Amino acid sequence: MDLERLLRGPIGRLPSGLAERVYRVIRRLPPIRRRIDAELEKMLDAVRERVKPYRDDVATHRRLPSTGLAREDVIATVASLAARERPTWEEGFASGAVYHGDAGHIEFLDEVLALSSQANPLHADVWPSVAKFEAEVVAMTGAMLGSDAAGPVFGTVTSGGTESILLAVKAHRDDARSRRGITRPHMVVPETAHAAFDKAAGYFGVRLERVPVGDDLRADVTAMAAAMTRNTVLVAGSAPSFPHGVIDPISELAAVAASRRSGFHVDACLGGFVLPWAERLGEPVPPFDFRVSGVTSMSVDTHKYGYAPKGTSVVLYRDAVLRRAQYFTATDWPGGLYFSPTIAGSRPGALSAGAWAAMVSIGEDGYLEATTRILEAAARIRGGVEAVPELQLLGDPMWVVAFGSDVVDVYQVMDRMTERGWSLNGLHRPPAVHIAVTLRHTRPGVAERFVEDLGAAVADVATEPRPSEGMAPVYGLAARLPARSAVGDVLERYIDLLYEV
Ligand SMILES: Cc1ncc(COP(=O)(O)O)c(C=O)c1O
């Protein structure tokens, strides 16, 4: 890859910190900037077709149609695009993405969404129903995560896991400023914690320290403790982590955080709606929720294993003062007295209605049954991975199954799986791929198909390794380039590409 040659010459031989600094300086020099831009363009050309598959056969609107299109034609377009995209998720080829997806459940949620499509909780006077739904979603989620034993917890509905994490960081930052006078806030997370913590650090000016995990891919408690400073406002752990699906030692981390007067956040975006039921089913689930003293906040995604429509999550706090540190109020604005609990102003009340409807319709028995099925399918997939000699299972996962390889290029394996219709997640540090098992994979034959395709994909790569045009080269490049902002530049161009018409 030419960008690689460009950056792996003299820069590539530097230690990574220095390489990064040199790259940042030289990319500002116009001739080098132009060369980098040209190389990035070339890379994008290679993926443009994959990212924009409808360019040639679906009308493109670069400006408003002078006369509005007939509704039935608009519906026909949306329906045809949805139909082309449906098989990947519906037939269980995607990691995560659609967590329930049964036709009856979707129809039911669609009806609720349609009934509340106009609702906006910013106008609680017009739609008090949404305030009811949101309060109950928070209460039910808290009850699932230890409030019965630990006493009341407080929270809000947000737009997703990322927003829940952003808000928990903001709340701890502001609370530490007012309660402890901390003006240079710092937080400590394991390197496996979700990228949303980096986003929060960037958005809210909190210095983030990512600490290497142990050989079992779980947070290293001693190293995390050593990374804490007097300014640490928040420590976090995952239950489980996105990359490898393992649960950090929550009790130990929370105890260390509490002993240093820091907050402690459990990112249970993936596990919040699975672990409580796995525990009831007798699985060995370590304590991870508000029953652990020292846990001050949690993020829990209704739109993942809560089986709600996309666009909702819950952030929970142990105390009401901390929740208030999340809120925003403007008291002198000519537009009136303004207040909102989360980042957005106006919000889709329909999604909160959908989350409420999903939770009350599924109930404890439904979540127990779903968890049983997911754990069974995951065990089959895990067993299949363990049976492929070229692959190595990472960590000791329950339902997010990650694997790497010392023998074959695991990104090429991922690309061969893509060629077989799968949409898996690439990971790095170490190079690996994972599948987050959902209800889609519990349908008859799906786990077996995964195992069979994986074995065939590995055999293909082992017998006939070949460069591919999929994600393998991008991950390979990301692993090899010492200047991380060069990788960031590639990703920014990719986002630009998404917005190309
Ligand atoms: C552990 C964990 N935390 C946070 C997130 C972010 O969630 P979202 O994509 O809903 O913003 C994810 C998403 O997969 C996750 O797995």
Image (cartoon, rainbow, N blue to C red):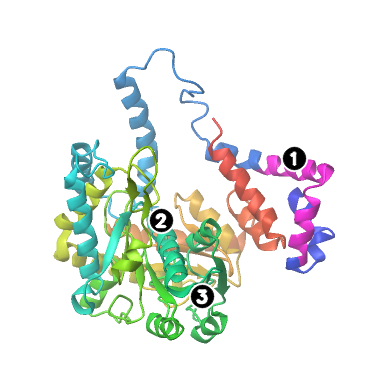
What residue type is disc 3 on?
Thr
Q: Circle 2 — which element?
A: helix
For the residue marked with disc 1, what is the amino acid? Ala
Q: Which residues are magenta?
A: 18-43
Judged left or right of residue 73, residue 487 is: right
Q: Which residue is mark 3?
A: 232
Q: Position of residue 125 (x, y in %)?
A: 19, 42
Quadrant in the picture for residue 95: bottom left
Query: Amino acid under label 2?
Result: Glu
Left or right of residue 107: residue 81:
right
Residue 403 part of the magenta-drawn span: no
> Which badge, 3 or 2, comes first in the chain's sequence?
2
Secondary structure of residue under mark 1:
helix
Q: Which residue reaches farthest top? A: 67
Q: Residue at x 56, y 72 (%)?
A: 210
- In reply to whether residue 25 is colored magenta, the answer given is yes
Nearest to the observer: residue 308 or residue 177? 177
* Magenta region, main secondary structure: helix
Question: Residue 163 has which mark?
Answer: 2
Asked if one can make out residue 190 in the rendered structure from this viewpoint, the answer is: yes
**Disc 2 CB within 8 Å of nearest ligand 1 atom:** yes
- Residue 141's place in the image compared with 341, above or below, is below
Front disc: 3 or 2 = 3
Disc sitting over residue 38 in the figure: 1
Q: Nearer the viewer, mark 3 or mark 1?
A: 3
Q: CA distance from mark 3 to mark 1?
A: 43 Å
Residue 253, quarter of picture: bottom left
Taking the image as shown, residue 271 lies to the left or right of residue 51, namely left
For the point 39% across and 12% down, the residue is 67
